[in-house]
Image (tube, rainbow, N blue to C red):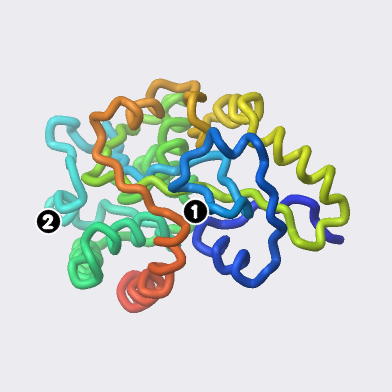
């Protein structure tokens, strides 16, 4: 069965677009979305954003001694207490963009020497930190950590320098959509202010300008106090191969 609307991962959407699989539709709602996250021709638009942060268990790590940035995670005192996801694509691509391949490789090797544990699933990673299985998570999704906080989890959030922000997924109409006009109307609604409010109600960070997250923890990025690095879909397309290579050679080889 063919879909009328699809949500595509940020690191493959340009590839799918280049293959001619998407229909062009310039929704009037797209003007409320920053150019850095959408394509210029009108093929895809994201509805929410994912910042990548460090999280730690406040019962196991004294906030006064907590890491403030990525290099602090290489401290030998944290050996065996760190967790990273088996698919840390946003963080890894963010490091490659900010640091380059050589520094990123050395950093991953440092994490390996410090006994980093590889888990699968960012939600699971946050849950394990809440349960005290690990003291720190290297690349948690901000909205997940914030949701855990609201349920009573003893987790604190650290915004590394820079904090990488990428789109969660982008919405697009397939070129062979069975009901393209209905798809266009539905996409208009998803991208509208009302649709963005639903994204916020769900505990996510809306990509639409003028619509704020519902929870104060998620609003800190907009305060200007956090150094932000945007990871675009073009960055992801360019950096996916070197990121996969480093992941397999270093983190997953054990």
Work out whether residue 225 or residue 107 is closer to the camera in this orientation and state it: 225
Q: Which residue is painted at 41% across and 69% down in the image?
A: 238
Q: Secondary structure at mark 1?
A: loop
Q: Which residue carries the number 1 mark?
A: 121
**Residue for point 48% across, 33% down:** 205
Question: Upstream in the sequence, badge 2 or badge 1?
Answer: 2
Q: Up-down: is 221 above or below 27?
A: above
Graded by Cα atoms within 10 Å as few (under 14), some (14 to 19) or many (20 or more), the crowding at tag 1 reads some
How dense is the environment of label 2, judged by Cα within 10 Å: few (below 14), some, or many (20 and up)?
A: few
In the image, residue 92 above or below residue 33: below
| Element carrying mark 2 | helix
Q: Where the N terminus falls, by quadrant?
A: bottom right
* Residue at the spot 47% in from the left edge and 24% down from the top edge: 212
Q: Quadrant of residue 97?
A: bottom left
Which residue is label 2 attached to?
76
Front position in the image: 190 or 217: 190
- The x, y position of residue 185, in whole percent, is 78, 38
Residue 213 place in picture, x, y as percent: 48, 25
| Image position of 99 (left or right of 50) | left
């Amino acid at each position: 069965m063919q879909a009328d609307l699809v949500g595509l991962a940020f690191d493959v959407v340009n590839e799918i677009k280049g293959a001619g699989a998407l229909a062009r539709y310039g929704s009037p709602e797209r003007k409320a979305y920053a150019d850095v996250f959408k394509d210029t021709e009108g093929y895809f638009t994201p509805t929410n954003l994912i910042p990548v942060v460090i999280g730690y268990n406040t019962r196991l790590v004294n906030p006064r001694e907590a890491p403030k940035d990525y290099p602090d995670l290489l401290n030998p005192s944290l050996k065996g207490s760190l967790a990273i996801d088996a698919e840390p694509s946003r963080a890894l691509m963010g490091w490659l963009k900010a640091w380059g391949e050589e520094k990123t490789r050395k950093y991953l090797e440092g994490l390996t020497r410090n006994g980093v544990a590889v888990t699968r699933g960012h939600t699971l990673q946050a849950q394990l930190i809440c349960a005290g299985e690990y003291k720190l998570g290297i690349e948690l999704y901000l909205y997940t950590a914030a949701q855990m906080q609201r349920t009573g989890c003893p987790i604190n959030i650290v915004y590394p320098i820079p904090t990488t922000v990428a789109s969660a997924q982008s919405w697009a109409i397939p070129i062979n959509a069975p009901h393209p006009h209905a798809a266009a109307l539905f996409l208009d609604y998803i991208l509208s202010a009302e649709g963005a409010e639903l994204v916020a109600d769900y505990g996510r960070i809306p990509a639409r300008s003028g619509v704020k997250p519902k929870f104060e923890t998620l609003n800190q990025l907009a305060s200007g106090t956090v150094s932000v690095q945007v990871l675009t879909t073009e960055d992801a397309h360019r950096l996916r191969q070197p990121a996969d290579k480093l992941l397999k050679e270093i983190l997953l080889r054990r």
